[in-house]
Amino acid sequence: MAIVETKNLSKIYHLGTNKVYALNNVNLSIQEGEFVAIIGASGSGKTSLLNLIGALDTPTEGEILVKGFKLSSLSQNEQTIFRRRNIGFVFQNFNLIPVLNVYENIILPLKLDGRSVDHDYVELLLENLKLKDKMYQLPNTLSGGQQQRVAIARALITRPAIILADEPTGNLDSKTGTEVISLMKFLSIKFHQTLMIVTHNEEIAQMSDRIIRIEDGKIC
């Protein structure tokens, strides 16, 4: 089953009379449970693709389907709810709330959605991510790798269909980065989730099931 499909997807910016294609006619299908790495140079369009799939931006042309739902058929409010319930995000800069402890950061998406907390599932995530002894610490007391593991737990807490990670190792040293990707891969298998990672790191990309290369807004 395809979790993500893009059909003739383009993102175009107008600079005066010139058209600049961030993405140019991208057709893509990603299957349930697949771990896909999107790789390309800076400015190639890989982050634009992730933002469109995650409904953080809207395409100029084409369609995006996530779990069979056309994102263009949803209102802005419906897209927000759909995103919150079906898509987990992991960013390069962690984006943790500094005044909330580890536990509070992890459960925040559930609170925003008015959902109850499955404490057994939280405990399972904390255990798998080796954060159990850090549960009540604030983000600024954690290492970069620990903060990224909190961000991963927060992305997983809603049990989304797909995890989108934009350069998740960008602020980590190579050893910690490899450990984080290995952990994300293990958890995606354990919890039957699809994983898409944007990276410019060839070694990180080689850990995926499939590599998709983008150059000048096109899939190579």
Image (cartoon, rainbow, N blue to C red):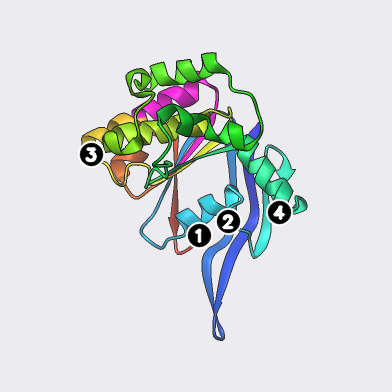
- Amino acid on which the number 2 mark rests in the picture: Val
Residues at badges 3 and 2 in contact (C-beta under 8 Å)?
A: no
- Amino acid on which the number 1 mark rests in the picture: Lys
- Amino acid on which the number 4 mark rests in the picture: Gln
Secondary structure under tag 2 reads: strand
The tag earlier along the polypeptide, 2 or 1, is 2
The tag earlier along the polypeptide, 1 or 3, is 3
Secondary structure under tag 4 reads: helix
Secondary structure under tag 1 reads: strand
Quadrant where the N terminus sits is top right
Q: Which residues are magenta?
A: 182-198
Q: Nearer the viewer, residue 62 or 167?
A: 167
Q: Residues within 10 Å of mark 3 (few under 14, many from 20)?
A: some
Q: Going by the picture, which residue comes out furthest to the top?
A: 120
Marks 2/1: CA–CA distance: 6 Å
The residue indicated by pointer 1 is: 218
The residue indicated by pointer 3 is: 174
Q: Residues within 10 Å of mark 4 (few under 14, many from 20)?
A: few
Q: Check if residue 214 falls in the magenta segment.
A: no
Figure disc tally: 4
Numbered badge on residue 31 = none
Q: Position of residue 64 (x, y in %)?
A: 66, 50
**Circle nearer the viewer, 3 or 2:** 3
Q: Position of residue 74 (x, y in %)?
A: 75, 50
Marks 4/3: CA–CA distance: 38 Å
Q: Is residue 61 visible?
A: yes
Residue 30 position (above or below residue 51): above
The residue indicated by pointer 4 is: 76
Residue 166 position (above or below residue 57): above
**Circle nearer the viewer, 4 or 1:** 4
Numbered badge on residue 26 = 2
Marks 1/3: CA–CA distance: 28 Å
